[in-house]
């Protein structure tokens, strides 16, 4: 693997890592948003 290919590979790896981080944050935010009404309903039921 030459330097150019290695550099491109590092860029792609970094991009996919950032995409994964953004996706994880989105999933967490969505999960929290979706769970909120259920938690409220559960606390009212008790």
Image: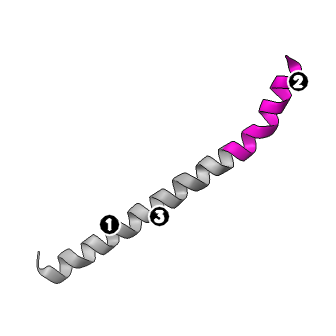
Q: Is residue 17 left or right of residue 33?
A: left
Residue sitting at the far top: 46
Residue range in magenta is 32-46
- The residue at which mark 2 appears reads as 44
Question: Upstream in the sequence, badge 3 or badge 1?
Answer: 1
Q: Are marks 3 and 1 in contact (CB under 8 Å)?
A: no
Any mark on residue 13, and which?
1
**Is 38 included in the stretch rendered in magenta?**
yes
Circle 3: element type = helix
> What residue is drawn where x is 13% and y is 80%?
3
Q: Residues within 10 Å of mark 1 (few under 14, many from 20)?
A: few
In the rendered image, the quadrant that contains the C terminus is top right
Checking the image for residue 33, the label placed there is none
Q: Position of residue 12 (x, y in %)?
A: 33, 71
Q: For the residue labelled by badge 1, is the local secondary structure a helix, a strand or a loop?
A: helix
Across and down, in percent, residue 24 comes to 52, 52
Of circles 3 and 2, the one toward us is: 2
Q: Between marks 3 and 2, how big is the CA–CA gap?
A: 38 Å
Residue 10, quarter of the rendered image = bottom left
Q: Does 3 sit above or below residue 38?
A: below
Q: Disc 1 or disc 2, which is closer to the eye? A: 2
Q: Which mark is residue 19?
A: 3
Q: Please tell me whether the stretch drawn in magenta is mainly helix, strand or loop.
A: helix
């Amino acid at each position: 693997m030459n330097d150019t290919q290695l550099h491109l590979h590092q860029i792609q790896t970094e991009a996919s890592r950032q995409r994964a981080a953004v996706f994880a944050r989105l999933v967490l935010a969505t999960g929290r948003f979706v769970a909120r009404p259920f938690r409220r309903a559960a606390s009212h039921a008790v």
